[in-house]
Amino acid sequence: DTPFGGVHVNTDQTTATDLGLPVYPGAQTVTDDDKHKSADVRAGFGEWQVRVRVISYATSDSKEQVTTFYKKALGRYGDVIACQGNSPVGTPTTTAEGLTCADDKSGKVQIDREDYGSSKDGLELKAGSRRHQHIVGFENPQDGKTRFSLVALDLPTEVEKNAGKSD
């Protein structure tokens, strides 16, 4: 912390409930390496604030079963879009709040899906707005288990102000 702002990182204390999402029935948290530990990262300088909360899970159920469960759960945050990499899968392709599958490279905040455990070109379910996103990102299966991360992103207000503008 400084008089101008600070950075806070908490690991292994975040739960699905903290993110506003339910835990998939029978799923277990993944803690087999530093990349998969739960985290709550906040950085702020004045009015500029960003927060990323993530927790990873694994289940023996199929990706399709997990996808169906989380499409319904994410619905509380508005339209749900499915993304394969940066491309939409099916409809809708954009939420009513303006969230898309494309990575926003024009903003000053860059969150890479690999930073929260999701595969670069893997399936993601997204709901919310460009500024307040809830994401379920899938990894490549390991040991016969479906692995996925629950993510809540709270981005600076400039993300909404710069929507549709390019540098």
Image (cartoon, grey):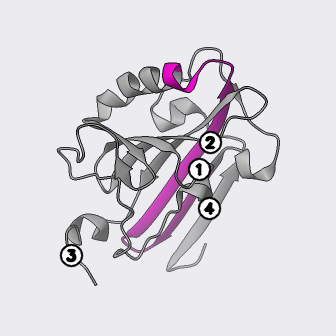
Q: Which residue is mark 3?
A: 165
In the rendered structure, find residue 139 and report the number of the disc placed on it.
Answer: 2
Q: Nearer the viewer, residue 92 or 23?
A: 92
Please tell me which residue is depicted at 44% across the width and 71% down the height of the picture.
109
Q: Which residue is mark 1?
A: 119
Please tell me which residue is depicted at 54% across the width and 60% down the height of the picture.
42
Name the quadrant of the C terminus.
Answer: bottom left
Most prominent secondary structure in the magenta stretch?
strand
Q: Earlier in the sequence, mark 3 or mark 2?
A: 2
- Chain part drawn in magenta: 40-65
The part of the image, by quadrant, that contains residue 90 is top left
Q: Nearer the viewer, residue 120 or 29?
A: 120
- Depth-wise, is mark 3 or mark 1 nearer the camera? 1
Q: CA distance from mark 2 to mark 1?
A: 5 Å
* Three-letter amino acid code at the position of disc 3: Lys
Q: Tell me: residue 100, above or below residue 109.
A: above
* Three-letter amino acid code at the position of disc 1: Ser
Please tell me which residue is depicted at 62% across the width and 18% down the height of the picture.
61
| Left or right of 22, for residue 92 | left
* Three-letter amino acid code at the position of disc 2: Glu
Task: Judge the density around disc 1: few (<14), some (14-19), many (≥20) Cα neighbours within 10 Å.
Answer: some
